[in-house]
Amino acid sequence: MQPTPYEPVRGFVEIEEGACCVGGKAGDSLEIETAFQASSPLGEVTQMRVRFGSRPFAEEQLTAAEWESFVPLKVFHIEIVINWVGYYVSVQYMDENGNLSAVYQGDISVEGHP
């Protein structure tokens, strides 16, 4: 079977249970919990590649991320800075037959205070 791009693998990513924003004292560290879910009618979703940063990443930019085993939850650590900063999680999933999902993205704003 020839793997097909973007079909039929589907999924999503959710940061901090869908919250718009989190915050804390500047200089402190913060854990950002991110949930992943994906499915495919043609096989088990076994791999994903993820990038976390201050901007969203397109598929071409996700190639810099290694494929890793699918996990339903990851925690990203950040250092809080003064003011508002946006963070993004971009993910692509792959099933056991090599079928890919589209790139899914989530975002959250972090407010730092003195």
Image (cartoon, rainbow, N blue to C red):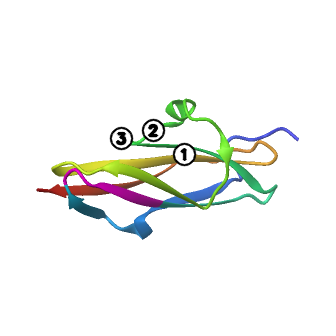
Q: Is residue 80 left or right of residue 39?
A: left
The residue drawn where x is 60% and y is 58% is 11
Other residues around mark 1 within 10 Å, as few (<14) / some (14–19) / many (≥20): many
Instruction: Find out whether the residues at labels 2 and 3 contact each other: C-beta distance under 8 Å.
Output: yes
The location of residue 30, given as percent across then percent down, is: 34, 57
The quarter of the picture where residue 53 lies is top left
Placement of 92 over or under 72, stated as above or below: above
Q: Quadrant of the C terminus?
A: bottom left
Q: Which residue is mark 1?
A: 103
Say if mark 3 contacts mark 1, CB within 8 Å. no
Cα gap from disc 3 to disc 1, whole angstroms: 14 Å
Q: Residue 3, how many percent across, how many down?
A: 79, 40
Task: Determine the secondary structure under disc 1.
Answer: loop
Boundaries of the magenta span? 26-33
Name the front one of labels 3 and 1: 3
Q: Quadrant of the N terminus?
A: top right
Whether 34 is drawn above or below 52: the answer is below
Image marks 2 and 1: residues in contact by CB distance under 8 Å: yes
- The type of residue carrying mark 3 is Arg
Identify the residue under disc 2. Answer: 57
Label disc, if present, on residue 55 of the rendered structure: 3
Spatial CA span between label 2 and label 3: 7 Å
- At label 3, counting other C-alpha atoms closer than 10 Å, the crowd grade (few under 14, some 14-19, many 20 or more) is few
The foreground one among 5 and 15 is 15
